[in-house]
Image (cartoon, helix red, strand yellow):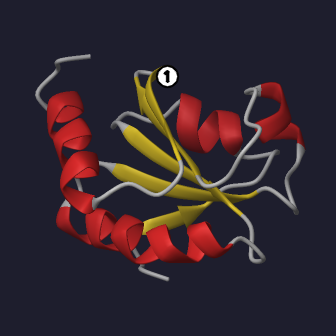
């Protein structure tokens, strides 16, 4: 996993995500999830490409069931985009990198 990706737990979610000074992309995943393994390289590429401008975090839903449950996440992979501690967008399932980049660019441009 990239050095530009933060592992987040139920206990650290508020501090690592909601209180972040920069926009955050959170990947909710599990080791057994095939689609999660498909999107993982894309998430890693985004983390490297937007390093310093976008925080990328991963939450293992098997090890941290409280946060996904409280956020109404029912399927994985789910990607949540946060700006100033507020959810700005949500993507469920595997999506192409260019679609995710467009979402990130809009967030970084202040369109949310």
Quarter placement of the C terminus: top left
Residue 52 falls in image quadrant: bottom left
Q: Position of residue 101 (x, y in %)?
A: 20, 50
Relative to 25, is 76 on the left or the right?
Answer: right
Relative to 21, is 79 on the left or the right?
Answer: right
Residue at horizontal 57 percent and vertical 77 percent from the top:
37
Relative to 109, is 7 on the left or the right?
Answer: right
Q: Is residue 104 visible?
A: yes
Q: Position of residue 12 (x, y in %)?
A: 72, 46
Q: Nearer the viewer, residue 105 or 16?
A: 105
Residue, disc 1? 87
Residue 46 falls in image quadrant: bottom left
Residue furthest toward the left? Answer: 109
Residue 1 higher or lower than 55, as above or below: below
Q: Is residue 53 visible?
A: no
Q: Nearer the viewer, residue 91 or 66?
A: 91
Q: Residues within 10 Å of mark 1 (few under 14, many from 20)?
A: some
Residue at horizontal 82 percent and vertical 45 percent from the top:
11
Q: Nearer the viewer, residue 98 or 46?
A: 98
Q: Position of residue 58 (x, y in %)?
A: 59, 59
Residue 83 higher or lower than 46, as above or below: above
Q: Secondary structure at mark 1?
A: strand
Residue 66 higher or lower than 93, as above or below: above
Relative to 81, is 101 on the left or the right?
Answer: left
Residue at horizontal 33 percent and vertical 37 percent from the top:
22
Q: Position of residue 80 (x, y in %)?
A: 51, 38
């Amino acid at each position: 996993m990239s050095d530009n990706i933060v592992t987040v737990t139920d206990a650290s979610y508020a501090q690592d995500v909601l209180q972040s000074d920069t926009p955050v992309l959170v990947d909710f995943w599990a080791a057994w999830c095939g689609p999660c393994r498909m999107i993982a390289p894309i998430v890693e590429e985004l983390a490297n490409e937007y390093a310093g401008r976008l925080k990328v975090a991963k939450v293992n839903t098997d090890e941290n069931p409280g946060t996904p449950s409280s956020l109404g996440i029912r399927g994985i992979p789910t990607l949540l985009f946060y700006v100033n501690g507020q959810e700005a967008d949500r993507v469920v399932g595997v999506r192409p990198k260019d679609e995710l980049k467009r979402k990130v660019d809009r967030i970084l441009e202040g369109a949310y």
